[in-house]
Image (cartoon, helix red, strand yellow):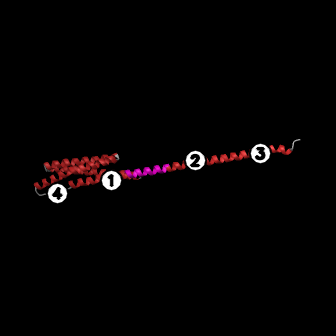
Amino acid sequence: MIDSRTVSLPSQLTDSATMANSGLWVGILTALTALGASYITAQATFRAARAQVETTARAEALREERERRRAAYREMMSRVHAFNVVTWQIDDVDAARDRESKDRHLTQMYERIGPAIGDMNRAMHEVRLDGPASVSDAADHVRNMARRVQQRLKALLDDANTEHRDAYDAAYRDFRDTYVTFIALARGALEVENH
């Protein structure tokens, strides 16, 4: 005869094994869920950190670019001012009472204007490197107008008649207008980079 305890024993073992298997599966699923959540969180954290690093690097690069441009634009403006100092000596020519004094002042202006344009040319190339193209083109145009003033000054030195003086004044006004355009474009380029 079979003892009932023996028969029920395998049934209890089966239930215990099933419960143990269920607990094991619950543990495995919980561990996998935790690992998956951890992985997803780590990926999101990594992406956020990478985006922050990229944003910071981009902002720093833009700041450096803006500072380089600002320095190049200031140098160009400084060289244009030095050129203007030479051209404003035309007032000394006008104030001179005799032809010899006028010629001496014109000669001094002409001797100084070439190096001033050379300095402006170097500054213009710095602007060309840092851009943008519209500001670079404007700086080039300023330099070209300065050369035109130099040509008109040479004509005035060779023959100081009214026609040559009017041509000099017109060339200087054109130069000044192109310089004002350069300033506006440079300021605009710096303001765009600021936003």
96 drawn magenta: no
Q: Amino acid at mark 2?
A: Tyr
Which stretch appears magenta? 50-65
Q: Residue 48, how many percent across, how many down?
A: 51, 50
Which one is earlier in the sequence, the residue at label 1 or at label 3? 3
In this figure, which residue is indicated by the disc labeled 2? 39
C-alpha distance separating marks 3 and 4? 115 Å
**Residue at screen point 30% across, 50% down:** 182
Judge the density around disc 4: few (<14), some (14-19), many (≥20) Cα neighbours within 10 Å: few
Q: Nearer the viewer, mark 3 or mark 4?
A: 3
Find the distance from the CA under tag 2 to the CA under tag 4.
Answer: 80 Å
**Residue bearing mark 3:** 15
Q: Decide if residue 15 is in sight here.
A: yes
Residue type at mark 3? Asp
CB contact under 8 Å: marks 2 and 1:
no
Q: Nearer the viewer, mark 1 or mark 4?
A: 1
Q: Give the crowd class for mark 2: few <14, some 14-19, many >=20 residues within 10 Å.
A: few
Circle 3 crowding by C-alpha within 10 Å: few under 14, some 14–19, many from 20:
few
Residue type pointed to by label 1: Ala
**What is the CA distance from the residue labelled 1 to the residue labelled 3?**
83 Å
Instruction: Please tell me which residue is depicted at 31% across the width and 48% down the height of the picture.
Output: 127
- Kindly report which numbered mark, 2 or 4, lies closer to the viewer in this rendering: 2
